[in-house]
Amino acid sequence: MQFKSEVIVHGVKESKGSIDGRDFSSTTFHCEVDLSENSAGRSIGRATRPFKIQNASEFEKWAHLGASLPIKAVATFEMAAAAQDGTKMVLLDIRPLEQPKKAA
């Protein structure tokens, strides 16, 4: 199941190379999320969590926005099955929602 969500991107990291003959390529987006309470105690505020797209070239689409971060974006996620009856969110696409203002 796919869905779109508005997110706030705080950082973008490219990862590309080869280890033991295996190539890898990804871009990680650090997006703001709510802190959730658990049995260990209460919490308030927000944190960031990494969401990865399996293509390092995605970084180039965001490189010019570095000075504008954090920035609002619209992300397309897919909900997929995870281990032990869990679910995980896979980032499929992410695009800036607003263009940065040019300096006067």
Image (cartoon, grey):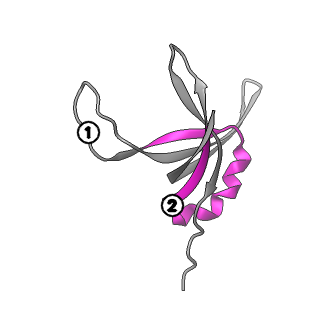
Numbered disc 2: secondary structure:
loop
Could you classify mark 1 by the number of other residues whose Cα lies within 10 Å: few (under 14), some (14-19), or many (20 or more)? few
Relative to the observer, which residue lies in front, 65 or 40? 40
Numbered disc 1: secondary structure:
loop
Residue 67 x %, y % = 53, 66
Residue type, mark 2 in image: Leu
- Which residue is disc 2 drawn over? 69
Count up the numbered dots.
2
Residue type, mark 1 in image: Ser
Magenta-drawn stretch contains 64: yes
The image shows residue 69, relative to residue 24, as above or below, that is below
- Which residue is disc 1 drawn over? 43
Magenta-drawn stretch contains 1: no
Instruction: Specify start and end residues of the magenta stretch as a single range.
Output: 48-77
Figure quadrant of the C terminus: bottom right
Left or right placement of residue 75 versus residue 55 in this view: left
Report the Cα–Cα distance between label 2 and label 1.
Answer: 25 Å
Residue 49 x %, y % = 47, 40
